Amino acid sequence: MAKGIWVFTEQRDGEIKKVTYELLSAGRKVADSLGEELCAVLLGKGVSGLEGKLGEYGADKVYTVDSEALENYTTDAYTNILADLAKEHQPTAILLACSASGRDVAAQVAQRLGTGLMTDCTDMALEDGQLVFTRPVYAGKAIVKAACPEARPVMATIRPNVLAADAPQAGRAAQAVPVGGNTGDIRQVIKDIVKQISTRPELTEADIIVSGGRGIKGPENFALLEELADVLGAAVGASRAAVDAGWKSHSFQVGQTGKTVSPVLYIACGISGAIQHLAGMSSSKCIVAVNKDPEANIFKVADYGIVGDLFDVVPLLKEELKKLLA
Amino acid sequence: MKIVVLMKQVFDTEAKISLDGNKINKQGVSLVMNPYDEYAVELGLRIKEKFKGEVTVVSVGGPEVQDALRQALAMGADKAVLVDPGADEIDEYTTATILAKAIGGLEYNILLGGFKAIDDGSCQVCGRVAEILGVPVVNMVTQAEVEEDKAVVTCDIDGGSAVIEVKLPAMLTAQKGEIEPRYPSMKGIMQAKKKPMQKIGLGDIGLDAAQAAPKVKALSYSLPAARAAGKLVPGEPAEAAKELARLLREEAKVI
Ligand SMILES: Cc1cc2nc3c(=O)[nH]c(=O)nc-3n(C[C@H](O)[C@H](O)[C@H](O)COP(=O)(O)OP(=O)(O)OC[C@H]3O[C@@H](n4cnc5c(N)ncnc54)[C@H](O)[C@@H]3O)c2cc1C
Ligand SMILES: Nc1ncnc2c1ncn2[C@@H]1O[C@H](COP(=O)(O)O)[C@@H](O)[C@H]1O
C-alpha cells in the first residue's frame, strides 16, 4: 500500500533551496489530509546535518544519502538512488522542484517506476482524495488540471516561487534515516563545471527581477538595470531581442524559449511585451513596465506602468527606491 | 553514424488558444516544428556532415505532422517515420513508449531531441525514451563534440553549465546554444518530396493501445484570467518615479 508524501530536496553546495520549503509546506497539508507521513529525500555530499531544517519545515522523516559520488548532480546516480528508495518504500507521491536537475531526475525516475509525471505545476490540491495538479500549458495561454489516477507514486515538479512556504517551527525535529544508497554505474562523466558567479539571486528563484529589452540599446546600458537590481536585491533578466543582440547570454533570457519566472515583482524596461516574452513572466505577482511607447503590449499586463524614456526613469526610480529602502 | 532525431510538431508560438468544450481547440492553429527540435535536427545534420551517415526523424502524431517532418527532410534529414498513436488523449508515457518501440527497431548511434516541447513544456519525453532504451541522457545541451564512440557536451545545469562526456549511444536534448538551425534551401525542399516518409500505426511496431495507455489524465482545461488593467503612473519622470516607488511599497506591498 502506497504511503507517504515525498519531497525531493533541492540542495546546492549544502544549502537547501527555498523551493524545498515551499514543497514541504504544501506537502504537509496533503500529508495531514491523507493521514500519511511527509518525508524528505536528501542526496548530496556533506549534507548530513541538514535534516533539522527539513524537520522545521514539516518533514516527519528524512532519507539521507551522503556520499562523495553525489557531490555534483548526475542523472544516473540521482535516478538510481531515488528510484531504489521509491521502490522500497512505495510512496503515494513524489514532489520535486521544477529546476534543471529536478526535471531531469523526475523524468528518469517516473519512467523507471512506470508512472505519470506532471511538470512545471503551479498548484496542487486534494480533490475527492485525489492529488490534482495545475499546470500552465501553451506558454501559459491555457491551464490544465491533471491527475495520475492509478499509477503510483504520483510525480510532479513544481515551479519555484509559486507556493507559499510556511514559517519554520523551531525545534520541530524529523527522524533522520541515513541510507547507504547505490549510485550504480554513472554514465554521465563530469569533465568540468562552470558556476555562474553572481552576487545576485538566480532568475528562477528571485523575488524581484529587473529585465531589459531592445530598448536598452546596448550591452553597456545594462549597468543601469544592474544598479537598480542592486538596490532591490534583484536578479537581472533580458528579452530575447537583447539576448539575440549579444548583450546578455541566453541564461538571462525570460520567455517561452528562455526561463519561466514567478517573482513577486517584475520590472520590464524597454521590453515591448511580445507573447513569447509574456509566456515566461506573466505569473509574476506584480508587473511594472517602463516603455516610451504608450501602445506597447507590455502595458496590457503591467500592474503599474510609466510611459517614458527608460534612460530618464530608471535612474530616478533607483534613487527613489533607495530612499524608501534606506 | 546513424542519427535519430525525435521531433514534435507544436502550435506556433503566436497561436491564440481557445477551448472547444473541455479541450484545446486545434482548428485553424498554425503548426511548426518545436523550436528546440530545430536545434536537434541541425545538430544531427552537423554530425552527419562530419561522419557521413544518416539522419532519421521520428515523430508521434497525426497526419498533419508530415509538414514538420518534410521541413526536417528539406533541411537535410534522410528519412522520416511518423507513428500515429490512434488516440487523442495521450501523455508523455504514451509518447515515450511509442517512440522507444519505433526507435528500438532502428539502428542508432546517437539520439537527439529537444529539451522541452513548447506546448506542454513537460521536459520528459526524451528522458523517458532514454530510460526505456537503456541509454544515458544528457539534457539541455548547448554544444556537442561528437566522436565515433563518445560525445563531449556542454549543458546548462542549475546555477551554471557543465561539460559532460558520455559514451554512445546516448540521448542528447538540445537547449538554445550557439548553433543556428539552417533554413531549407529550394533544392532541399524539392528533394524532400522524394525522401521516404513512413507512416505507421501502433500495430506496425508491435504495440497495442493498452500497453501505451496514458498514466496522466487531463481533468479540465481553462483559460487564465486576464490580468486586471493596471495603472499608468502619470507625470514627469521624476514625479512618476517617486509615485511608482510609493505605490510599490504602500499599495502593492512588494518592496
Ligand atoms: C519561437 C520564438 C520564441 C521566442 N522566445 C522568446 C523568449 O523566450 N523571450 C523573449 O523575450 N522573446 C522571445 N521571442 C521573441 C519575441 O517575439 C520578441 O521579438 C521579443 O520578445 C522582443 O524583445 P523586446 O521587447 O526587447 O524588443 P522590441 O519588441 O523591439 O521592443 C523594444 C521596446 O523598447 C521600447 N523602447 C525603446 N527605446 C526605449 C527607451 N529609451 N525607453 C523606454 N522604452 C524604449 C520600445 O518602445 C519597444 O516597446 C520568441 C520568438 C519566437 C518566434
Ligand atoms: N510526439 C512526439 N514525437 C516525437 N518526439 C517528441 C514528441 N513529444 C516530445 N518529443 C521529443 O521530446 C522533447 C521534449 O518534449 P516534452 O517532454 O513534451 O517537453 C521534444 O523536444 C521532442 O524531441
Image (cartoon, coloured by chain):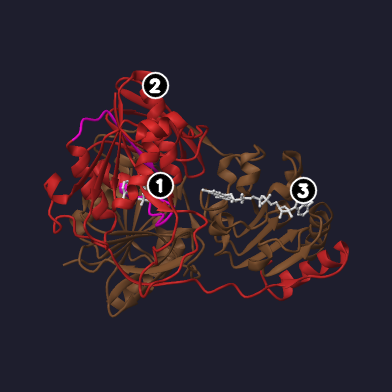
Chain colours: A brown, B red
Image check: A189 left or right of A239? left
Instruction: Report whether mark 2 lies on the same chain as mark 3.
Output: no
Q: Judge the density around disc 3: few (<14), some (14-19), many (≥20) Cα neighbours within 10 Å.
A: some
Q: Are marks 2 and 1 on the same chain?
A: no
Label 2 sits on residue:
B49
The circle on residue B160 is: none
**Rendered position, B76 above or below B209:** above
Q: Nearer the viewer, mark 3 or mark 1?
A: 3
Q: Secondary structure at mark 1?
A: helix
The residue positioned 49% from the left and 63% from the top of the image is A140
- The quadrant of the picture occupied by the N terminus of chain A is bottom left
Q: CA distance from mark 2 to mark 3?
A: 45 Å
- Return the x and y of residue A218 as percentages of the image width and height: 74, 40
Q: Say which residue appears at 39% left-offset and 57% top-offset.
A: B120
Identify the subunit bearing mark 2.
Answer: B
Q: Position of residue A244 (x, y in %)?
A: 61, 40
Kindly identify the amino acid type of the residue bearing the numbered disc 2. Glu
Q: Chain of mark 1?
A: A
N-terminal-most mark, 3 or 1? 1
Q: Which residue does the numbered mark 3 point to in the structure image?
A: A224
Q: Can you give x and y, in whole percent of width and height, for residue B233 in the image?
A: 78, 70
Q: Chain of mark 3?
A: A
Query: What is the three-letter code of the residue carrying label 3?
Result: Leu
Mark 1 within 8 Å of ligand 2, using the beta carbon: no
For disc 1, the marked residue is: A101
Magenta span? B106-125
Q: Which amino acid does the dot numbered 1 rest on?
A: Ser
Using the numbered discs, state the Cα–Cα distance from disc 2 to disc 1 in whole angstroms.
Answer: 32 Å
Residue at disc 3, CB closer than 8 Å to ligand 1 = no
CA distance for labels 3 and 1 = 33 Å
